[in-house]
């Protein structure tokens, strides 16, 4: 028994151990996982400083060459390109220099030269968190953005080239027409500058066209490219997403299994308050542990893009749920069985009585008299309902399947189906009538199949029989009817027959005849009613009792 209780813990521990054992294998870079050659060893600090010194010296030489080229270059576009490259190389040289000093001194140079600690800014911190997501999106859209940039640059140079050639032709025309040597020399220098611009524009057009052709001309079929992209996704983010989802599902199922095993040992119904409180805490812990397992796995893989997306989704979920805190509070009270709706009590829902069977993550309402009488409802639909204790003898519905009902107008119906939505009954002759369940509950009907039924008729006799109407006639009529009924099938189901004087009417003396029958005879209700009247009439004929006619009295004014 103890081993069976510990089995979910062992399964969870084994699953976690397998994940952490295989984590380095699936997350490691294939290049980094290769073994190093026997002769290779980590570089020393001096070797690193020497490499940095060579890099700094090479950058300084390149900077000097670019500064010289900047002075000699007359083309503005070229000068702008040289300035941009100079800024990049100067920044790279400064970074190498800081790294050189950091290694040499053993101190973080940025920490000593950066001044006081930067003030906390919420916008910057948020952007720092979102930067992996933005970088990932930029990386995913790098190729189309690069193609768009190349097309825009190519269109710019192609549109500029006709204007340059037109300018060259105009300067050439002025040069041919000029007579002044100084003006002609200045026009020649201008023409040379514009020829350089034309050559540079043609070079840019050729370069951009080549790059665009290289990026747009597929050297492999589209299907192969899609397959490679899909396999790359599977090996990187697809793998991380699958393992994170597996961690979420595995943790959730293990905790749910543990919860199921725990609830199997709880026999009390309804469970006490501390059990309900533990259930609520367990449900919350299950959700938090499952989400944390997925996030920790993404963190272990270093997949900041998926981790950022998951965090954004969680923040959006919490933000959207902030307005429903009052509703969550009411649902928590229902789970703890502390609200207006409680387990084991009776509640009216959609006009029908229900028993509150269970209140947990969802509510279960049960009506034992209905086919399919089990409703699983979200807790938010149960908020505001009120239940009450019920007595054991309270009926849950006025009928059961196959019951015989007496409807208004002395109409007999047999129930053939009753569900939470409708009640279907078969009338005399085989016709079927359907009522909504709530409407059926409000009908004025009599169930003949529960505990039995009785038939009451009134017999009117003439006033001349007044002398024997109280004793002899009731006794004689009862004996006659019992004898007649005994010779018929109805006599076998008759439980009791009562004949007594009822009242003195204006034109007759009335006898009350009441016959009791068991529930098995409910289907013959109308026939039994007619048969009793027939036997009473036969008794009057046989015994010579006169039945009076209605009398009409005229009053003269």
Image (cartoon, grey):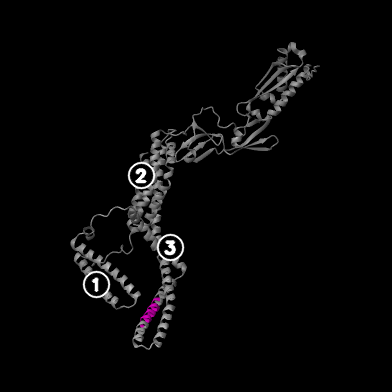
As drawn, 226 above or below 295: below
Q: Can the viewer see residue 303? A: no
Q: Can the viewer see residue 309? A: yes
- Based on the displayed image, in which of its 4 quarters is residue 275 positioned? top left
Residue 369 magenta: no
**Is most of the magenta stretch helix, strand or loop?**
helix
Q: Which quarter of the rendered picture does the C terminus lie within?
A: top right
Depth check: give the residue in front, 449 or 223: 223
Give how far across and how far down residue 546 sits, in percent: 78, 17
Could you tell whether 458 is left or right of 376 in the image? right
- CA–CA distance in space, label 2 to label 1: 64 Å
Could you tell whether 3 is left or right of 224 in the image? left
- CA–CA distance in space, label 3 to label 2: 37 Å
The disc placed on residue 60 is 1
Residue occupied by mark 2: 9
What is the secondary structure assignment of the residue under circle 3?
Answer: helix
Q: Which residues are magenta?
A: 192-204
Residue occupied by mark 3: 230
Q: Residue at x 35, y 39 (%)?
A: 2
- Dot 1, crowdedness within 10 Å: few (<14), some or many (≥20)? some
Extreme residue in the top direction = 467
As drawn, 66 above or below 106: below
- Dot 2, crowdedness within 10 Å: few (<14), some or many (≥20)? some
Give how far across and how far down residue 177 sits, in percent: 41, 87
């Amino acid at each position: 028994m103890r081993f069976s209780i510990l089995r979910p813990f062992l399964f969870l521990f084994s699953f976690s151990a397998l994940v952490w054992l295989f984590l380095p294998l699936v997350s490691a870079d294939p290049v980094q996982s290769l073994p190093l050659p026997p002769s290779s060893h980590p570089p020393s600090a001096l070797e690193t400083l020497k490499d940095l010194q060579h890099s700094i010296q090479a950058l300084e030489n390149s900077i000097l060459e670019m500064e010289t080229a900047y002075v000699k270059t007359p083309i503005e576009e070229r000068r702008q390109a040289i300035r941009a490259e100079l800024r990049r190389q100067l920044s790279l040289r400064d970074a190498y220099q800081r790294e050189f000093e950091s290694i040499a001194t053993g101190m973080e140079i940025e920490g000593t030269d950066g001044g006081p600690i930067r003030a906390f800014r919420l916008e910057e911190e948020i952007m720092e968190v979102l930067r992996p997501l933005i970088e990932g999106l930029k990386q995913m859209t790098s190729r189309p953005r690069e193609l768009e940039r190349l097309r825009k640059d190519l269109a710019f140079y192609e549109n500029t080239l006709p204007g340059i050639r037109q300018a060259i032709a105009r300067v050439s025309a002025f040069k041919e027409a000029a007579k002044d040597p100084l003006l002609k020399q200045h026009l020649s220098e201008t023409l040379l500058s514009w020829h350089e611009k034309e050559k540079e524009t043609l070079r840019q057009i050729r370069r951009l066209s080549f790059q665009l052709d290289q990026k747009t001309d597929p050297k492999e079929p589209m299907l192969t490219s899609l397959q490679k992209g899909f396999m790359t996704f599977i090996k990187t983010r697809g793998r991380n997403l699958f393992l994170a989802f597996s961690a979420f599902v595995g943790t959730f199922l293990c905790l749910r299994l543990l919860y199921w095993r725990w609830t199997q040992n709880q026999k009390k119904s309804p469970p006490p308050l501390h059990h309900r409180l533990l259930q609520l805490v367990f449900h919350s812990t299950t959700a938090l542990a499952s989400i944390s397992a997925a996030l920790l796995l993404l963190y272990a893989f270093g997949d900041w893009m998926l981790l950022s997306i998951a965090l954004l989704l969680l923040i959006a979920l919490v933000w959207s749920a902030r307005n429903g805190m009052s509703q969550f509070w009411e649902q928590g009270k229902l789970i703890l069985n502390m609200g207006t709706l409680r387990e084991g009590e009776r509640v009216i829902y959609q006009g029908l009585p229900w028993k509150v069977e269970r209140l947990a993550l969802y509510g279960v309402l049960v009506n034992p008299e209905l086919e399919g009488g089990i409703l699983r409802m979200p807790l938010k639909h149960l908020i505001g309902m009120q239940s009450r204790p019920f007595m054991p003898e309270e009926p849950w519905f006025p009928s059961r399947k196959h019951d015989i009902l007496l409807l208004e107008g002395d109409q007999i119906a047999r129930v053939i189906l009753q569900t939470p939505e409708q009640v279907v009954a078969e009338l005399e002759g085989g016709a079927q009538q359907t009522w909504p369940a709530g409407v059926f509950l409000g009908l004025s009907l009599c169930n003949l199949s529960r505990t039995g039924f009785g038939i009451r008729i009134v017999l009117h006799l003439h006033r001349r029989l007044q002398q024997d109407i109280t004793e002899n006639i009731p006794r004689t009529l009862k004996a006659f009817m019992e004898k007649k009924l005994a010779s018929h099938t109805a006599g076998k189901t008759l439980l009791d027959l009562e004949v007594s004087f009822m009242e003195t009417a204006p034109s007759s003396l009335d006898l009350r005849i009441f016959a009791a029958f068991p529930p098995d005879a409910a289907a013959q209700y109308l026939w039994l009613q007619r048969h009793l009247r027939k036997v009473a009439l036969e008794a009057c004929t046989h015994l010579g009792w006169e039945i009076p006619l209605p009398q009409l009295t005229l009053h003269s004014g």
